[in-house]
């Protein structure tokens, strides 16, 4: 993919670079951090990358001298993958305090520096973070997402065509995911790209950030990446399955979060609900990566495999579609910053896939279905939640793979998943 695709993160970057001394662009490897920085940075900035071994060694040997040398070259500096030299953090803190000019230090990181054991200082108060995710469908289409506004106004536009939204269409987009490099790539090449990405990029970083001393544990955790998405994480069960020490398994799972490969969606818990789970749901941040780990790279082969595999495969498809919705939804939530994203699950089996709440106490309750049809029963948990919260505004949405926008009654709409980007 040669043409630059404008990212939603650009607007947040522009704002933060005017009010914060440092701006950090964070996200998984190969999501486009370097590309967006080159597009937005001032041409006069002194730019270096800590992915280069020579730069790492020089910076680590004398962090203060290294940064001072960069400042002599330009008042503005940019450091790619700065977290690779943890000793830079303290000196960057000093540099930011010395010069309060907004946006004169730009950093990128594919590992959350705060979760690295070797980092004992924070840049809080001096740095603004821009989370760059893999491409959303709205970014690929060149559209500005407006789904949340559609929900609150109950104005979803007209029905879609089968070419715009269907189960095959949604699954094909989910199988590709959002890594810029794989857009337009044949499935066989995409498979090789993801294999190389996991082996050469993810595995070494995960071993480093988690402190794992054995490659086989890293491989086990990566191998379960896809099947963990959309679920609560039970570390003890994983440890028993892997026959590994629980602490090591937990460190590896947390390492996936530190690498921005998995997100933790907290549970919405209030006293009005008895026996609500407090456990987070975890989501893989890119469905192309998730699909690869599950062994799905091509839609036709996926359909053939799921036909033979039965129930387990249908569960994987449901989790894949739910995760795909998450990747599109969370990007818009982060862009707008008016809503916070949760899930809700009770012991009595009531469950809402995504529950959004704003500062005014309004809710958006979303159920995700992988089918092309809907049924009024699909809204039963949303209606149950509405009845529990009679004094609050609750917008109910059943997202599904069909084409029609339909009123299901009691404030709930069935809406095509493609409305997230069309």
Image: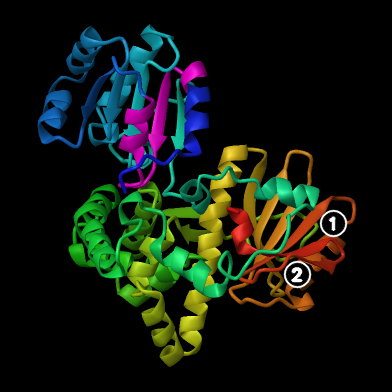
Q: Is 91 situated above or below 117?
A: above
Seen from the viewer's position, the closer of residues 387 and 291 is 291
Query: Does the stretch in magenta take in 31?
Result: yes
In percent of width and height, residue 216 lies at 21, 67
Locate the C terminus and report the quarter of the image it occupies: bottom right
**Residue beneath label 2, please?**
381
Q: Would you identify the image quadrant in which residue 67 lies?
A: top left
- Secondary structure of the residue carrying tag 2 is helix
Specify the segment rendered in magenta. Answer: 17-40
Q: Would you identify the image quadrant in which residue 214 lies?
A: bottom left
- Residue drawn at x 66%, y 50% as measured from the top left: 147
- Residue drawn at x 35%, y 52% as measured from the top left: 255
- Residue drawn at x 56%, y 50% as measured from the top left: 330
In percent of width and height, residue 83 lies at 29, 34
Residue 121 appearing in the image: no
**Residue beneath label 1, please?**
389
Please state if 307 lies on the left or on the right of 330 as rendered: left
State which tag comes first along the sequence, 1 or 2: 2
- Secondary structure of the residue carrying tag 1 is loop
Query: Does the stretch in magenta take in 337?
Result: no
Total label count? Answer: 2
Residue 8 appearing in the image: yes
- Residue drawn at x 60%, y 71% as measured from the top left: 162
Q: Is 192 situated above or below 3?
A: below
Please state if 19 lies on the left or on the right of 36 as rendered: right
In percent of width and height, residue 260 lies at 39, 49
Q: Residues within 10 Å of mark 2 (few under 14, many from 20)?
A: some
Seen from the viewer's position, the closer of residues 217 and 41 is 41
In percent of width and height, residue 103 lies at 42, 18
Q: Residues within 10 Å of mark 1 (few under 14, many from 20)?
A: few
Image color mode: rainbow
* Image marks 1 and 2: residues in contact by CB distance under 8 Å: no
């Amino acid at each position: 993919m040669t043409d630059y695709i404008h990212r939603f993160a650009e607007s947040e970057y522009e704002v933060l670079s005017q009010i914060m001394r440092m701006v950090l662009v964070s996200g998984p490897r190969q999501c486009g951090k370097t590309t967006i920085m080159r597009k937005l940075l001032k041409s006069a900035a002194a730019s270096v990358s800590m992915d280069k071994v020579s730069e790492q060694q020089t910076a680590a040997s004398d962090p203060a001298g290294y940064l001072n040398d960069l400042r002599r070259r330009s008042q503005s500096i940019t450091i790619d993958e700065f977290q690779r030299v943890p000793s830079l953090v303290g000196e960057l803190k000093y540099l930011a305090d010395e010069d309060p000019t907004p946006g004169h230090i730009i950093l990128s990181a594919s590992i959350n520096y705060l979760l690295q054991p070797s980092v004992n200082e924070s840049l809080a108060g001096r740095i603004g973070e821009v989370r760059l995710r893999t491409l959303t469908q709205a970014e690929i289409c060149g559209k500005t997402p407006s789904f949340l506004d559609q929900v609150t106004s109950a104005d979803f536009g007209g029905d879609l065509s089968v070419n715009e939204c269907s189960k095959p269409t949604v699954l094909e987009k989910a199988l590709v995911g959002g890594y810029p490099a794989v857009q337009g790539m044949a499935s066989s090449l995409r498979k090789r790209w993801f294999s190389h990405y996991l082996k050469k990029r993810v595995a070494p970083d995960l071993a480093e950030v988690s402190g794992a001393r054995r490659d086989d544990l890293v491989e086990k955790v990566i191998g379960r990446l896809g099947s963990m998405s959309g679920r609560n994480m039970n570390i003890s069960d994983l440890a028993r399955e892997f026959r590994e020490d629980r602490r090591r398994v937990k460190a590896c799972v947390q390492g996936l979060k530190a690498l921005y490969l998995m997100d933790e969606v907290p549970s919405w818990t209030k006293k009005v609900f008895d026996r609500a789970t407090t456990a987070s749901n975890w989501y893989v941040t890119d469905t192309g990566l998730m699909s690869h780990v599950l062994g799905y790279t091509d839609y036709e082969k996926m359909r053939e495999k799921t036909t033979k595999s039965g129930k387990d495969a249908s569960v994987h498809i449901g989790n894949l579609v739910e995760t795909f919705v998450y990747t599109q939804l969370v990007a818009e939530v982060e862009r707008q910053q008016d809503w916070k994203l949760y899930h809700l699950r009770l012991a009595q089996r009531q469950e809402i896939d995504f529950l959004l709440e704003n500062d005014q106490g309004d809710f958006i309750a979303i159920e995700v279905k992988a089918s092309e049809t809907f049924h009024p029963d699909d809204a039963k948990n949303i209606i149950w939640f509405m009845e529990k919260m009679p004094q609050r505004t609750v917008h109910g949405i059943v997202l599904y793979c069909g084409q029609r926008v339909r009123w299901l009654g009691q404030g709930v709409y069935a809406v095509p998943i493609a409305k997230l980007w069309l």
